[in-house]
Structure formats: C-alpha cells, structure tokens
Image: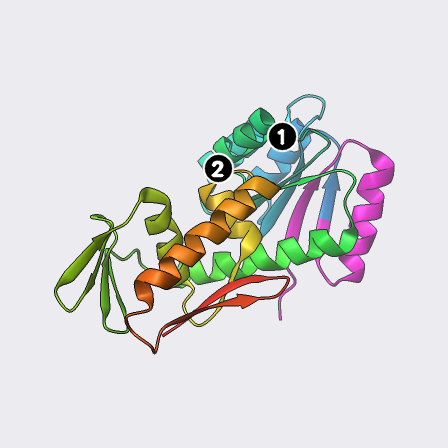
C-alpha cells in the first residue's frame, strides 16, 4: 500500500523535526518545510495526500497558504497546527479551508488520531454523492426542506437539528466522530457547544423514537452511531 504523503510546514525546527520523525515512525511520508512560501512551491511541484500547516510562519502565514493550496486542490485535507486558540482564529482557520485545528501543545497520539479520522472522512466523501433525501427506517428526511416525515406526519427541524441528522445519515452504521461534528456545525468544539450537541442528539432520538428499529448510540470516547 502506498504511504500517505504529508506536507508538513512548521517554522520551529525542533518541533518540525520531532513531528517528521514521529510521523515517519507511524509509517507516513512527511516532507518538512519551514516557511509558507517554500511549502506552496513544493505543493505546486509534488503530490500530497494531506497538509499539516503551522499558522505563524515567515514569508507566508498558514491561513494564506491554505487558501492558495485550496485554489490548487479544493479537496486536499488541511490541519492547522498553532498556538492561537482564540475563537476568531479558529473561525479564520476554517474559513481558510481547514478540516481540523489543533492547538499547541498537543500529544503526538492525538495528532495521529485526527489525521486518521480526516483521511477516513476524505475517502468516504470521494465515494459519496450529495443527497437531498435520506430514508431512515420508516422516516424520510428532506435535507433542503429540513423536514422529517413519518407515515405522512412531518416534523420541521431546526437548522442545527437538520445539519446533525444529515451528518448521522452520511455516516449511518458508522461512528460519527464527536470532534468532527462539533467543528462542522458549531465551528468550535468547546464544552458548551459539546453540551449543546448532546441536547440536539436527545431531540433527534425523540423524533426518531416512532420507529423502534432506529437507534442513535453513544460510542464512548468517540461519538455517535446511527443504526437503522
């Protein structure tokens, strides 16, 4: 199997080398550069599976770099590595095209977990076409109208209920990772947003309870799974 090639842009030489060595040990194929301009030049030349980008870099910052990379390849996964964790920085990161955002200091194990999660989602997206309707047991879910229908009776969903149910449907019978759902819908995976998502999960369970064959399971330490 071909190794996952990673463009690693990190201006701290010690951290960069540490990351490169660890990712190599985990059988990835990282290429380390120390500034944004060099990273963009390399991206134009070589083929990569995923990008790990520091935000504060000389020549070109990570946000600008991500926008340039997205212009060349809209689908390549991007993870920001940064010490900046203010809400506006997180939002700016996602606007720049990030799939995930990990703040320093972080554990190497967490980074690898996030890389693996994003690669799974990326592979799944490539094989899926967007859907306007989902059949969930005896329910029909109209995504554009945000309408959940059961035997002729319809329930209008809120925007966040609809977005969360769509993510569950796209990942049915598989784990919907909690962190991914939070960042996809709420942008920020803080404690309060996590509690808010739990409330919406409870509401969706109530709506879907009319069909006893449908379950939304809590997968401890990971997320949720829609069974139907």
Q: Nearer the viewer, residue 86 or 193?
A: 193
- What is the spatial separation of the Cα atoms under label 2 and label 1, in whole angstroms? 12 Å
The range drawn in magenta is 1-30
Which residue is rendered at x = 78% and y = 57% of the image?
24
Up-down: is 110 above or below 86? below
Q: Which quadrant does the N terminus fall into?
A: bottom right
Q: Is residue 3 magenta-colored?
A: yes
Q: Position of residue 134 (x, y in %)?
A: 26, 63
Q: Position of residue 57 (x, y in %)?
A: 71, 26
Residue farthest along the top direction in this orientation: 59
Instruction: Please tell me which of labels 2 and 1 falls first in the chain.
Output: 1
Near mark 2 (Cα within 10 A), the count class, few <14, some 14-19 or many ≥20, is: some
Along the horizontal axis of the image, is 111 left or right of 43?
A: right
- Is 57 on the left or on the right of 43, as rendered? right
Report the number of discs. Answer: 2
Instruction: Give the left or right position of residue 29, taking residue 228 as reference.
Output: right
Front-most of 71 and 41?
71
Report which quarter residue 208 is drawn in.
bottom left
What residue would you read off at disc 2?
Answer: 70
Mark seen at residue 62: 1
**View extreme (left): residue:** 152
Q: Nearer the viewer, residue 35 or 203?
A: 203
Q: With respect to residue 138, does 141 lie above or below?
A: above
Question: What residue appears at the point 50 percent right and 58 percent down from the top-left corner?
Answer: 121
Q: Please tell me whether residue 88 is drawn above or below residue 17 in the rendered image.
A: above
- Neighbor class of circle 1 (other Cα within 10 Å; few <14, some 14-19, many 20+) is many
């Amino acid at each position: 199997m071909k190794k996952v090639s990673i463009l690693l842009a990190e201006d701290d030489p010690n951290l960069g080398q540490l990351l490169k060595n660890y990712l190599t040990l985990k059988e990835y194929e990282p290429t380390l550069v120390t500034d944004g301009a060099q990273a963009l030049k390399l991206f134009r030349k070589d083929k990569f599976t995923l990008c790990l980008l520091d935000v504060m870099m000389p020549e070109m910052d990570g946000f600008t770099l991500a926008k340039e990379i997205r212009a060349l390849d809209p689908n390549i996964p991007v993870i920001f590595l940064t010490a900046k964790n203010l809400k506006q920085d997180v939002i700016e990161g996602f606007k720049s095209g990030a799939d995930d955002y990990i703040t320093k200091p972080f554990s190497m194990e967490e980074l690898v977990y996030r890389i693996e999660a994003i690669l799974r989602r990326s592979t799944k997206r490539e094989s899926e076409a967007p859907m306007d309707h989902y059949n969930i047991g005896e329910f029909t879910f109209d995504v554009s109208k945000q309408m959940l229908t059961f035997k002729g009776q319809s329930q209008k969903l809120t925007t966040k209920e609809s977005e969360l149910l769509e993510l569950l449907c796209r990942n049915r019978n598989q784990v919907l990772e909690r962190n991914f759902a939070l960042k996809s819908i709420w942008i920020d995976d803080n404690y309060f947003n996590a509690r808010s998502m739990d409330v919406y999960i409870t509401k969706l369970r109530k709506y879907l309870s009319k069909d006893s064959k449908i379950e939304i399971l809590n997968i401890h330490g990971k997320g949720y799974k829609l069974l139907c």
